[in-house]
Amino acid sequence: MKKKLNIGIIGYGFMGRTHSNAYRRVVNFFDVPYEPVLQVICGLEADKAKAFADQWGYKSHTTDWRKVIEDKTIDVVDICVPNNVHAEIAIAAAKAGKVIVCEKPLALNGAQGKEMVDAVEKAGVANLVSFNYRRVPAVTLAKQLIDEGRLGKIFHYRANFLQDWTISAKVPQGGMATWRLDVKAAGSGVTGDLLAHCIDTAMWHNGPITTVCAMTETFIKERMNVDTGKVEPVGIDDACMFLCRFENGSLGNFESTRYARGHKALYTFEINGEHASIGWDLHDLHRLNYFDHRDESIVRGWRSIHVTDADMPYMGKWWVPGLQIGYEHSFVHQTADFLENLAKGKPTSPTFREALATQYVCDAVLASAKNQKWETVKKR
Ligand code: SOE
């Protein structure tokens, strides 16, 4: 019999669903040491929380996150609410000795993120920030190939995260569906929401980013705020581009926008090394593109690796070679790794402290865009 681990998720939106699905599925496919039990779902509206509880099999629901923290039977507090509430909940959960999972980005900014890191480290509780794309098998395979030295010295890392859902001026800010456009709830726009993913993966693949030079734009200056009912200035960055230097001497080039008509969630990266290059595209997430200059010239070229074989990261746990998996599985993998490490008393990456490094890059990017100069990224 596996030890039961009682889960309380705060937030029943998009991320509440991805995390609930992961806790439910993980035991079916991975030999994890715990059986997660969906104990309580917490959300703003009681009827929606109840409907969510019924649909996902939660034992109970509440509209008060403090009740989740105070509940002695809850082992894991999983934070899936807008960014401005992460810190308060995480710090209270740490004081109550809970294991904590928090959606990305860690916080509104580095200063707040640092308070969260201090809280979890003081309490000595296990913690994880959900940068799920690391655990798409092709992205994990890219990390493996880099660590094996196949690329040799790395020269370039470039990443994009392109969307198009805010082009209409009629899209409001604030509220349940569009809080990402309200700077008070989100902290920033594409920098914290989308580039944070690219930065997390990039530093995992290629080490720390040291300096940045950025440019941001807010194309639509005013939007109706659903919370206040008034047309208010837009405080987020709609688009952001930045150049950077990595500690290992390589150069980075990052771009994100919600104004790239035709692109819904086009997260791509390419890494160029001395011997080989790697490319990946979220719209084709089970493939890893690989070019190796050491191949015999008459067959040398970009190959498209179908990441479905059993010896590729995580894939041995799913179907048979050739059958691919998708977006939601990255959360299942994250949960599997987290539960395995939890039983061994080992941290799972990215911890709050590792996510703070990403937050500091985001801070430097926004400062650079504001000050129109290169900025040095704060060290931990
Ligand atoms: C924004 O549209 C968003 O949902 C992000 O918040 C997620 O982190 C990203 O994975 C997909 O896009």
Image (cartoon, helix red, strand yellow):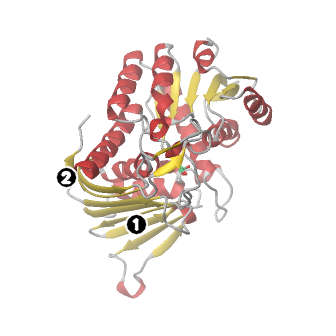
Q: Residue at (31%, 42%) from the top-left corner? A: 363
Determine whether the beta carbon of the residue marked 2 sits less than 8 angstroms from the nearest atom of ligand 1: no
Q: Which of the pair 185/241 is nearer the observer?
A: 185
SS at mark 2?
Answer: loop
Q: Quadrant of the N terminus?
A: top right
Q: Residue at (43%, 67%) from the top-left corner? A: 279
* Residue wearing tag 2: 374
User: From where the camera sits, is residue 356 visible?
Assistant: yes
In the rendered structure, find residue 278 and report the number of the disc placed on it: 1
Q: Where is residue 256 in the image (x, y as percent from the top left)?
A: 42, 58
The amino acid type found where label 2 is placed reads: Trp
| 253 is higher (above) or lower (below) than 363 | below
> Residue 207 vs residue 138: left or right?
left
How busy is the neighbourhood of tag 1: few (under 14 within 10 Å), some, or many (20 plus)?
Answer: many
- Name which quarter of the figure residue 249 lies in: bottom left
- The residue positioned farthest toward the front in the image shown: 230
User: From where the camera sits, is residue 152 visible?
Assistant: no
Q: Where is residue 18 in the image (x, y as percent from the top left)?
A: 63, 42
| 204 is higher (above) or lower (below) than 62 | below
SS at mark 1?
Answer: strand
The amino acid type found where label 1 is placed reads: Ile
